[in-house]
Image (cartoon, rainbow, N blue to C red):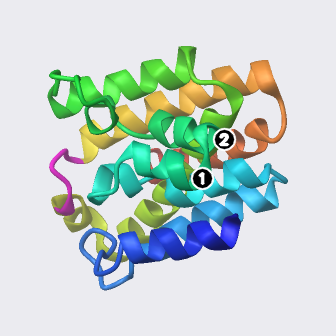
Amino acid sequence: MIFRAIKFAAEAHEGHYRKGTNIPYISHLMNVMKILCENNCSDEVVVAGILHDVVEDTPITIEQVERKFGKTVADMVAGASEPEKTQKDQQWKGSWQERKQHTIDYLGNEANLDKLLVSCADKLDNARAIKQNFMELGDKFWERFNAGKEDQKWYYTGLAEAFEKRAKQYGTPLSNMSEAFSKVVNDIFNPQ
């Protein structure tokens, strides 16, 4: 199932690159997969990690994910996606800050362990990429985003707090990923 997901994601994300780079987007999905595998997550969690952006960023629907990979994987992918991308009846499309607050609240209060693992691995790889690019480019790096450095700090700090809170509830492997995420976020926004 993992190799089918890799092929599916590679085809769906063909021609996509990491924001502001010439790095194929599939590299992010493989990094998320690696984080989940290193933390001994189930095959279904790993597959959801590989597919976590396919509904948000490609024409693929959540129904197609469910048909190909099952309801459990589709539910995890939906949990890692903004609601208006997965729910046909969803009319609400809030501002960037409203959408990000929804994500923080969902992860901090509602998401089950599998959805937390997928989201934490995703956010951990994103934070690692931000750290690397910020170290290379300095403050110019933040021009790639619609929301600037202070907004990103608010968002990533809120995510770190949500993951830390839930890691106390679930322990490892979420606590391992949460600790790594918090460290990277701190390195980016509160350097020594």
Task: Using residue 135 as the reference point, say whether residue 83 is left or right of it.
Answer: left
Which numbered disc flags the more N-terminal residue, 2 or 1?
Answer: 1
Which quarter of the figure has residue 135?
bottom left
Residue 146: within the magenta? yes
Question: In this orientation, does residue 44 appear?
Answer: yes
Q: The disc labelled 1 sits on which kind of residue?
A: Phe
Query: Label for residue 69?
Result: 1
- Residue at the location (56% across, 61% down)? 50
Q: Residue furthest top?
A: 109
Q: Which residue is mark 2?
A: 117
**From the viewer's perspective, is residue 186 above or below residue 126?**
above
Task: Using residue 79 as the reference point, say whether residue 30 is left or right of it.
Answer: right
Question: In this orientation, does residue 182 appear?
Answer: no
**Nearest the eye: 27 or 5:** 5
Q: Magenta stretch: give its range.
A: 144-148
Task: Using residue 25 as the reference point, say whether residue 95 is left or right of it.
Answer: left
**Nearest the eye: 146 or 93:** 93
- Residue at the location (31% across, 76% down)? 17
**Percent x, y of residue 16:** 30, 75
Bin the neighbour count of mark 1 within 10 Å (Cα to Cα): few under 14, some 14-19, many 20 and up: some
**Percent x, y of residue 93:** 16, 28
Q: Residue furthest bottom?
A: 22
- Residue at the location (46% across, 62% down)? 131
- Main SS of the magenta segment? loop
Residue 162: within the magenta? no
- Residue at the location (20% across, 34% down)? 96
